[in-house]
Image (cartoon, rainbow, N blue to C red):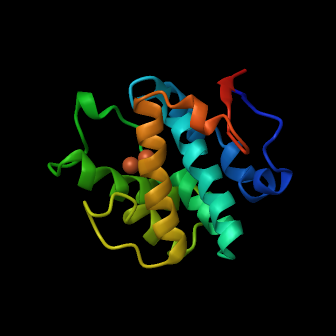
Amino acid sequence: MDITLSEDIDAEYLEDVADILTNKEFLALNSYRHHVATTRLMHSINVSYISWLTAKKLGCDAQAAARAGLLHDFFLYDPREGRPSRELQAFCHPKVAARTSRETFEISEKERDAILSHMFPLGPLPKSREAWIISGADKICACAEVFHITIALARDGRVAVSPA
Ligand SMILES: [Fe+2]
Ligand SMILES: [Fe+2]
């Protein structure tokens, strides 16, 4: 499966996440519905790109923010059909995402911690500035996706993703 990204996405961003965005297993996230009207892949790219832009502006590690942002919901199951553990989905899925990410890609400890803490305050405290950025971007994107706030996201740097 191919994905089409909007042309205004920075080429440097695409370079930072190229291995992830071309990985078949990762792209399978596009077959899971997420936040009502989007897919888990689109949500992940939105979070990742917003995190990358924010990290760059603040002088943080933009590549780590982009990669962990992309991988923060890398779990390949539908929570409505059951979970791999007895924990609530809010606590369970960051752990599964961290494990799947480590099995599939080379990720740093900082990236792993950011994935594990993205649900804060449900779960561990973010340890790095990049982790805080991802946790914030996730909440902003979730609200925008649930309430279809496309106007806000349609301004500069908006990420539009659609199946090819
Ligand atoms: Fe999540
Ligand atoms: Fe998320």
Give the image quarter of residue 150.
Answer: top right
- The number of numbered discs placed on residues in the rendered structure image is 0
Specify the quadrant that holds the N terminus: top right
* Residue 157 located left or right of residue 106: right
Give the image quarter of residue 64.
Answer: bottom right
In the image, residue 58 sits, relative to residue 77, either above or below, namely below
x%, y% of residue 88? 18, 48
Residue drawn at 36 percent across, 56 percent down: 94
Residue drawn at 57 percent across, 39 percent down: 25
Is residue 158 visible to the viewer in this orientation of the structure?
Answer: yes
x%, y% of residue 96? 36, 53
Is residue 74 visible to the viewer in this orientation of the structure?
Answer: no
x%, y% of residue 135? 43, 60
Most extreme residue toward the left is 86
Residue drawn at 46 percent across, 53 percent down: 100
In the image, residue 19 sits, relative to residue 161, either above or below, namely below
* Residue 51 located left or right of residue 96: right
x%, y% of residue 98? 43, 60
Specify the quadrant that holds the C terminus: top right
Residue drawn at 66 percent across, 43 percent down: 23
